[in-house]
Each structure stands twice: as structure tokens, then as C-alpha cells.
Amino acid sequence: MWVSVPLENKKRIKAVFTTRHGGVSAPPYETLNMSFQKADITEHVLENYRRISEDLNIPMEQMVLSSQVHGSTVRVVEQRHCGMGLLKKSDIGDTDGLITAVQGIALVTFHADCTPVYLYDPVKNVIGLVHSGWRSTLLNITGKAVRIMKESFGCKPENILAALGPHIRKCCFEVRRDVYEQFTQTFPNMQHEIEPQGEGDKWKINLSGIIRKTLSDEGLAENNIQDICRCTVCEKELFFSHRGSKGRSGIGAALLMMEARQ
């Protein structure tokens, strides 16, 4: 039903990524589709949330869902936002990243190849969850999230822990010239993360390497950046993958919550 990401072993932190198994959705969304944006039956998606809620012991009323547009908007959420996007209409607006300092709020973002980036400052007790697809990676959404944690909560980068969840990895992220040129223009010093494929007009890009570099550029220590090292395309029988299913797929969820102190 879900896998742990490297932050999960930290005290008071629940950091998971859902698989495609354990739900009730019918093909092509079988079975644990977490997105209301697909043509899935609403009650099926709600039941999937009920199952995740029960399994993780995270009340649905405490979840805050993102509204993703492959952009760079990151928003701070508070107690009043709980349940938005799931049990009540959201007024958060379009956002691909969520940050909170409120204990007990479960941040939720959606993924079917795009990279989930989990952030946690154990000193200031702040968490952040980012949906970093290739477009948002070009916009450096992860770096922006770190800066908001600094500006809004006084977080120091050297205290922030980061983890990358399952996503499309270099082995499967093949792009054409238009995307290749956007990456080389945006990240001119990261050519080593981009590999040409034969003599054709295609390249493979290492999104995780680029995201790790943007995190270190913001001041995070290398040994504080973890990577689950799992590819959603290679493991398309376990995870939802847009590319692996040629667009006919459900959507998985990343969840991050800071539990209240006992």
C-alpha cells in the first residue's frame, strides 16, 4: 500500500509514498488511485483515502492536498487548511509545494513519475513537501521551498533534512531536443547529469542529481540529502507511472506529517 522514504526513520515523522496496490479503483486506475483529477469514481478515491488513513493512522480531516500545475508555487498551510482538497473545497490555489510548522497536519502531493521531495527541519519543527516534475525542476521549486522555510520560519539550511521519493530516473527519462535545451540553458554546470543517446536526437536526464545539486546550492549538507533510489517506470507494476503506462494510469501520493509531541 505504501513504502517508506528515508525520513520515515526520524522521530515524530511519517514520510511515505503510496503504491498502486491496496485500493478499490478499477482499470486503468487500479487500484490505489489517489487523485480526483482522473476519470475515476469519486467514492472509489475516497475509499482509497480511508484505507490509507486507517493504515497510517492519519485522520483524513488532517490531510491537506496540493493543487498541482507543474509550476513553482509553494504555500505555507495552517490548521484551518486541514481537509482541503479532500473533505472540503480548497482555497489554497494552485500549488506544487506545501510547508507547515503545525504538528499533526499531513501534507499530500501527487505523483506518477514526478519527483516527490520531502523536507524536514528538526530544530524549528517545520516540514515541506514538493512536487518536482521536470517543469518544476527547471523552475527550481525545491530551492524555493527551502528559501520559504528560511524566510518564514527561520530555518537554517544546515539543519534541513531532505529525501527524494520514487520517480522517473535517468534510466527511463528520455527527452527530445526542446526539453534538453531547456535543461542545458537552466543548468549549464550540470552537463554531467545529461547523457546523449546514440546518434539520435534524444538525451537522458538525471532529475535526482539536478535536484540534489539545487538543494546543496541552498546550503543543505550532502549527507542530509537522501534518495530512495527507486524508479517508477522500472517498477510500474508497483507504482503508478504516466510514461510507463503511456498516460493511462492512476496517480500515487506522497504524504509527510510531523506528529505531535507526547
Image: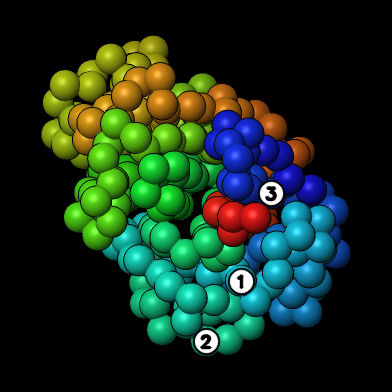
Relative height, residue 121 to residue 151 (above, below): above
Which of marks 3 and 1 precedes in the sequence? 3
Dot 2: what SS? loop
Residue linked to disc 1: 62
The dot on residue 18 is 3
Q: Relative to residue 8, is residue 52 depicted above or below?
A: below
Q: Which residue is mark 2?
A: 89
Amino acid type, callout 2: Lys
Image x and y of residue 175, in percent: 38, 34
Is the C-beta separation of discs 2 and 1 under 8 Å?
A: no
- The reply to whether residue 157 is in sight is yes
Which residue sits at x=35%, y=20%?
Answer: 222
Q: CA distance from mark 2 to mark 3?
A: 23 Å
Residue closest to the eye, 17 or 194: 17
Farthest front residue? 262
Q: Is residue 64 left or right of residue 162?
A: right
Residue at 23% over, 22% down: 190
Tell me: residue 228, above or below residue 248. above
At label 1, the amino acid type is Gln
Amino acid tagged 3: Thr
